[in-house]
Image (spheres, coloured by chain):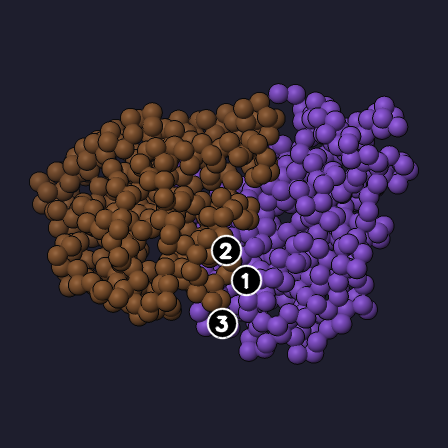
Chain colours: A purple, B brown
């Protein structure tokens, strides 16, 4: 193969160094004679892997000691149900901020369990912006406030952290699936953070949950055992067999993030990469990004071509240039370039070079 | 590393050829320039992987066309809840056969949703046998009958398939986590079969469900969307991002099974391997297996040493001989040798050689 750059929105590109290490260790992890896939999850080898992962995550993200870190299955979609099933705690309402398709999925699922108050929505502008905190109409009797910190499909990101200190009466819950560890993070503002791994953390099949310990332990009647956060807290994510290989790869990704210099450095790189592409979009009348400037995602950049009839040619020629998985989500069309942590700046430069050539040919 | 043999009960040894192929394809699957972990689950590359897996499974196991095959997350433990949440269909009772710790976990979870009738139990003999079908006291108004075809911890296996034809009014449900694809299988006797992958199929993080199509579509109110079989049927296991890498590895394992000659050949190998070890256990007064002969598992063989004070020395010397993960489950002690499909006969021969030497030294 020649070098390709993979702009998939998830599952997404992983750092090459991580894949190389996984390859080299596939049949023999650290002289154990076993693949990580073959290890008992309760053996000393795998226990060291999951403990390392938790420690690295706590250090990278600065997770306070009264927060538990859980490595679960079922993706963010499982959390859409687990959150109301655990956090309602005798209340009947929850506040949700609606900024696009992932918010809507969370809202739809929550309605099975409680009354959902849409505290703010950008539906009026086709989900092209993020409502500011002073636009959020919150309920005092809401059990929690839920928002999606980055909309993978619409390309809208909260470029600010809502101001809810740890002692806030109504805890803030965030779906950070597509921007976790892409920027600095103040965990203490949140009651619960969750993120499917397959964008910025590792392979599909793992979902990370960071939960303030006091919030767990109050599941609704009929909650499946696996949907009870306290069960997983008490068992250190080992109530049942965890997705061991996905945990191992995520551990390698976190070590790679540390080598990059941690979240501050990674955030600077992400700002730089996104600016390169947005600059082209904004200075071109061939390409267009619909998202309000202040709320543009650094991770997922949707854009359209002046003439949709050129979409197919664009994708085909991009692929011939080693630039793959640029097609926009089937619900919105156009293009989408996902620039997660693992996307090197060279990939963005190549994309821009190609886009300039394409537009000059078809202007 | 020198050659080791891994007797873990799960996650367990995988065929060496599978791991070698996974290693070779880690950074570039079939010239795509991508790792399987990096592929969009909706792209043509991954779609071909999951379709191949389903086809191979249908061929190997002879799955009738009115059965759906689902690749889900959450392990067998998620199924303990999903089964009552979906199969009760307005009924209030379910029949369960209790043959050990995994049966008990399924029963405990089902009690959250219905009245459980213990139709048969081997608790009277410390779960060392499997009740015959004429001992099952079934209820006509039960929604389904659940049994565990192989108890991983106790080492008890149903060496016969219960006789419930496809048109039986009460469907038969089987947890086949630890013996699926280890022997020939008549799917048409079952309403639903499920199996965590991490024993005979692939890595942890994937659970296989084979469900007769007419049984899905009747979830209890409050069932999380991800716990509704019909949602997964309608979306071909792609309602949310599936555990793509675990699916890929399982696909490689199934191709390996086909190369071995399919289930008939694999079953003969498993009979042979188990017989080698049971013969030693039965002709020795140093080792002891507590399970009734006709119900002994081919997959998980628990045994004790005459003097438990020797356990630690046994494990230590076994490990020095490259025979690892032989420690019995923490709840029962002693030893356990798991001889899944991927365990080569040489591994069993080496184990037996070591056991003979150890017993002659300590007799």
Residue A287 in the figure: left or right of residue A341: right
Contact (Cβ within 8 Å) of mark 1 with mark 3:
no
Disc marking residue B226: 2
Q: CA distance from mark 1 to mark 3?
A: 11 Å
Q: CA distance from mark 3 to mark 2?
A: 17 Å
Question: Which sits earlier in the primary sequence, circle 1 or circle 3?
Answer: 1
User: Residue B163 appears at what percent x and percent y?
Assistant: 19, 49
User: Residue B243 appears at what percent x and percent y?
Assistant: 50, 43
Q: Nearer the viewer, residue A343 or B95?
A: B95
Helix, strand or loop at disc 3?
Answer: loop
- Above or below, comparing residue A325 to residue B214 in the picture: above
Residue B159 in the figure: left or right of residue A226: left
* Residue matched to label 3: A220
Q: Nearer the viewer, residue A187 or A159?
A: A159
- Above or below, comparing residue A19 to residue B325 in the picture: above
**Whether marks 3 and 2 lie on the same chain:** no
Question: Nearer the observer, disc 3 or disc 2?
Answer: 2
- Above or below, comparing residue A192 to residue B202 in the picture: below
Helix, strand or loop at disc 1?
Answer: helix
Residue drawn at 81 percent across, 49 percent down? A291
* Residue matched to label 1: A81
Disc marking residue A97: none
């Amino acid at each position: 193969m020649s070098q390709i750059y993979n702009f998939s929105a998830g599952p997404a590109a992983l750092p090459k160094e991580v894949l190389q290490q996984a390859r080299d260790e596939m049949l023999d992890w650290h002289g154990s004679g076993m693949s990580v896939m073959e290890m008992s999850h309760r053996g000393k080898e795998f226990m060291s892997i999951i403990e390392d992962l938790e420690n690295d995550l706590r250090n990278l993200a600065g997770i306070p000691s009264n927060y538990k870190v859980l490595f679960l299955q079922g993706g963010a979609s499982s959390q859409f149900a687990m959150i109301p099933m655990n956090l309602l705690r005798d209340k009947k309402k929850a506040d949700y901020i609606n900024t696009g398709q992932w918010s809507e999925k969370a809202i739809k699922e929550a309605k099975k369990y409680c009354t959902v108050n849409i505290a703010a929505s950008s539906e009026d502008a086709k989900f092209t912006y993020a409502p500011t905190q002073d636009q959020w109409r919150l309920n005092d009797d809401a059990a929690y406030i839920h928002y999606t910190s980055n909309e993978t499909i619409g390309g809208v990101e909260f470029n600010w952290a809502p101001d809810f200190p740890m002692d806030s009466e109504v805890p803030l819950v965030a779906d950070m699936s597509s921007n976790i560890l892409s920027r600095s993070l103040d965990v203490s503002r949140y009651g619960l953070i969750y993120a499917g791994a397959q964008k910025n953390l590792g392979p599909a099949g793992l979902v990370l949950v960071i939960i303030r310990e006091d919030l767990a332990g109050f599941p609704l009647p009929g909650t499946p055992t696996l949907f009870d956060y306290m069960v997983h807290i008490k068992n250190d994510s080992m109530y049942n067999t965890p997705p061991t290989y996905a945990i191992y790869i995520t551990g390698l990704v976190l070590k790679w993030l540390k080598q990059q210099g941690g979240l501050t450095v990674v955030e600077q790189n992400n700002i730089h990469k996104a600016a390169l592409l947005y600059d082209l979009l904004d200075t071109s009348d061939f390409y267009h990004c619909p998202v309000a400037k202040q709320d543009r995602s650094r991770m997922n950049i949707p854009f359209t071509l002046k003439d949709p009839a050129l979409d197919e040619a664009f994708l085909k020629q991009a692929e011939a240039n080693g630039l793959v998985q640029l097609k926009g989500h089937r619900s919105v069309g156009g293009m989408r370039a996902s620039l997660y942590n693992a996307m090197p700046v060279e990939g963005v430069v190549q994309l821009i070079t190609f886009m300039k050539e394409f537009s000059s040919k078809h202007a």
